[in-house]
Amino acid sequence: MSLFSISIILGILPLGSSQFPRACANSGNLLRKECCPTWPGDGSPCGELSGRGTCRGSLLSVAPLGPQFPFSGVDDREDWPAVFYNKTCRCSGNFMGHNCGDCKFSFGGPNCTERKLRVRKDIFKLNAGESYQFLAYLNLAKYTTSQDFVIATGTYAQMNNGTTPMFRDTSVYDLFVWMHYYASRDTLLGGANVWRDIDFAHEAPGFLPWHRLFLLLWEREIQKMTGNEDFTIPYWDWRDAKGCDICTDEYMGGRHPSQPNLLNPGSFFSSWQVCTGMRGGRQERNLASPYQNF
């Protein structure tokens, strides 16, 4: 099951770096089961005229499902992305992305041939300017609509097999909240029935590489949003931590003095709204809550 977990985010399967490119979230593409957006650089699908990629049948895993998932054909995520699209961009060389318009990680330049060395710092080693920039970029991502991707608000069956698309805009930050939720949520069996004994993103050998690739893609979207190609997400070394030492207003937010489930009003993130119906509409410490919104 872990192969799905890796491929859904990175684009090992040819659909690219997210499930639903905006260019493919329409009835025409869903009915044709084709997602091969044009690359703006030459106006051809997948940048084929420039040798970046081609529109081809999707590569699907032939690995058997484990006993923890005793179903077939009930989950949109099975054999991803075949339920929605069976033809997608297959990128060549160092190109990647839903339209082969991006470079693989650690590469750059017009033809993705230039090696890029970026430094990832310990969050506690950032200087004041770097720390402020990191938090400001996260805040900007929360309020910037993703230009390339949308999120699904219904299953393929609820979309009447593609005739009634169900997608909505989302921010760059919330896109990745949703992607994490989509990969790890329970299987919907119809009505109120769900299968809870499965998690495509956790509890399997793919846990570490899945999240590593997830963060690389998030980092890349922030680079594109800000135009800062040198931006990297800092790491948190918590091996010797005796508590949550980043849970301060200087970093991820301290505890509200009178409402322990809320962030302190002085936090960068205290005004974030992450789900409908949240008490007071303000950011809670339990970051599982945003999934309720999707």
Image (spheres, rainbow, N blue to C red):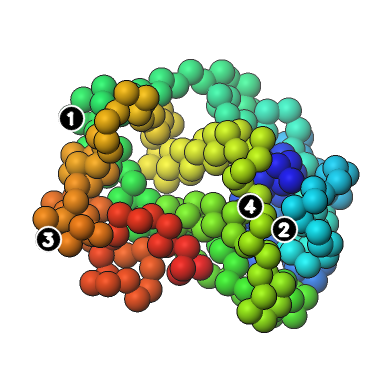
Work out whether mark 1 precedes mark 3 in sequence or the reverse, and give the earlier one: 1
| Residue density around tag 1, few if under 14, some if 14–19, many if 20 or more, within 10 Å | few
Work out whether mark 2 precedes mark 1 in sequence or the reverse, and give the earlier one: 2
Q: Which mark is residue 77?
A: 2
Q: Amino acid at mark 4?
A: Asp
| Labels 2 & 4 near each other (Cβ < 8 A) | no
Is any part of residue 200 visible from this angle? yes
Which residue is denoted by mark 1 in the rendering?
A: 128
| Labels 4 & 1 near each other (Cβ < 8 A) | no
Q: Is residue 172 left or right of residue 122?
A: right
Q: Amino acid at mark 3?
A: Ser
Residue at left offset 24%, top offset 42%: 247
Q: How many numbered badges does the structure rendering display?
A: 4
Q: How far is mark 3 from mark 2, CA to CA? A: 42 Å
How far across and down, in percent of the image, does residue 292 sit?
46, 68
| Residue density around tag 2, few if under 14, some if 14–19, many if 20 or more, within 10 Å | some
Q: Which of label 2 and label 4 is nearer to you? A: 4
How far across and down, in percent of the image, does residue 19 sit?
64, 55
Q: Is residue 196 left or right of residue 108?
A: right
Q: Secondary structure at mark 1?
A: helix
Which residue is denoted by mark 3 in the rendering?
A: 258
Residue at left offset 74%, top offset 76%: 157
Work out whether mark 3 precedes mark 2 in sequence or the reverse, and give the earlier one: 2
